[in-house]
Image (cartoon, helix red, strand yellow):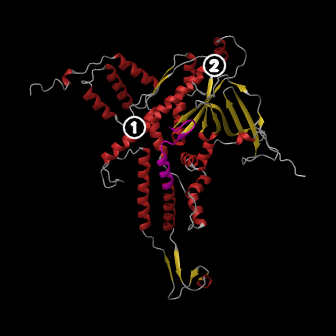
Amino acid sequence: MATEVDVDPLAWLDQRHPHYESMDTLERWQRWRAVLDEMDTKEAKEKFLPRTEVELSSDYEFRIKTAEFLGGTDSALARISGAVFGTPAKIEVKDPDVEAFIKDCDGAGQKLVDFFEGIVSPEAQGMGLGFIGIDKAPKKAETVNKAQDREMGHLKCFLTFYAAEEITNWGLDAVGLPSWVIVSRAITKQDSPSSPIRYFAERRVIDTKEITIYRKELDKDGKPKDDKARYAMEGQPVPHGLGEVPIVPVYGKRHGSFAGWCVVPGSVRADIQRFNVETWHALDLYRHANQILTLTSSREISEIVKGPVFRLLEDEELAYVSPGSVGFQANEEAIKRLKMDGREQSGTNPAATSDGANSTTGESGIAQRVRFTHTEKRAIEEHARQMENGIREVLRIVAKYFGTTIEPAVTFYTTFDTSELPDLMNTYGRSQFWIDSPTWQRAMLKQIAAKSIPDLDDAEKEQISKEIDAQPIKPDPSTDPRTQNLGN
């Protein structure tokens, strides 16, 4: 008689959304993640530096062991984030509790804008998508009004960032908003310093009413601890009372609900190709730096080597291999092409200003700079809009937790260009007489002040801004080009 198969009734917790499966199958997320993590594991190196059919095992092991990833994607992402967050964003909410949250969004004193700049922005750009979970502080006791809630610490919210791969399944309602999500994470637990470390697979089911947590114990290799390991509910579901899922998706490039795209996919691909080329280059360097002896003989090696001495006949020869330069030149040209591809795709090439012989394309330096500036401008502007939308949505849900409704105004003060201080000063000097707007002139002066001393703290920036707002705007008539040389 066949025995009944023991099926875990909560096995549905491990089911993945079709979009997740497609991204994983096509290796997009894996590729993007490997580049963002700088190929820091042996598994990532083996996946993206596969062994070729003509490669000896020892050569491949050496190539994997010595491979160092020096990509350009991280600097491209940092450049875009720096342009968006270089000048502090202005957030207006007109609610004291939400204002307090903006100054401490994670319970550890981190400002909301810093949370977005340091965690959300690079992840959303590189992986195309990131998620912010919003949790409210639990009630310690029943209260009768908002003042008591504030006094008891109930009017506090805490943000948790979830990577793109951690939201493994979800459902959408008729208008495309999430009706439930499943957060999948691996966690550890230790009851005391002397207790053993325990490993768990955690599944958080978050719907429009409550949050339910399930856990299954694993071994240290991430496999079920034994045949009887099953998911079990941790405590009771925690109601949140929002009527919506307190998860905010933040996109790099949006491709629909819960579907995002890497901001610089071409740069990622170029980084991997360059990584592959440079590891072969390193192997060639090793071979040529440690020259190989070749022996021309028809005899067995035991007949030739006598102790520490080689005994050769007249027609036999023992000599070092002479390295050629063709392979080095080919590698050098390939790396130039791959670097150029990465710069084209990411739109970041600070050095593209030279018309010299070392230019990697047939374009002049000026043509390169114009093209890269336009590409970068689009990427920065799009990313700023995504960050604004994410902050606005987080604040809306936080206010809802606090029992109020707000329409936050979020503005990033960026010109979306790569102009330097001399450019700004030249523009202001030429235009101040033609643009009869004190507001425009004060805005330009604030930008000039910010670029002239980039390491000012927030208090100093605010003070300078106040002083500029208070000073009269009166251009010097003697330098007005409209009144000069009238007698000529």
| Residue 457 versus residue 165 in the image, above or below | above
Give the residue number, with chain letter if any, for mark 2. Answer: 155
Tag 1 secondary structure: helix
Callout 2 crowding tier (Cα within 10 Å): few <14, some 14–19, many ≥20: many
Residue lying at 53% horizontally and 32% vertically, measured from the top left: 116
Give the residue number, with chain letter if any, for mark 1. Answer: 377
Residue lying at 65% horizontally and 14% vertically, measured from the top left: 151
Whether residue 107 can be seen here: no
Residues under labels 1 and 2: Cα distance? 39 Å
Q: Which residues are magenta?
A: 252-273
Q: Is 472 positioned to the left or the right of 193 in the image?
A: left
x then y, percent, for residue 90: 46, 24
x then y, percent, for residue 411: 45, 26
Which quadrant would the C terminus be assigned to in this image?
top left
Question: Residue farthest to the front?
Answer: 174
**Tag 2: amino acid:** Leu
Callout 1 crowding tier (Cα within 10 Å): few <14, some 14–19, many ≥20: many
x then y, percent, for residue 315: 50, 88
The image quadrant of residue 366 is top left
Residue lying at 60% horizontally and 42% vertically, measured from the top left: 19
Whether residue 265 can be seen here: yes
Which is more toward the observer, 420 or 16? 16
155 is within the stretch colored magenta: no
**Tag 1: amino acid:** Lys
The numbered mark, 1 or 2, whose residue comes first in the sequence reads 2
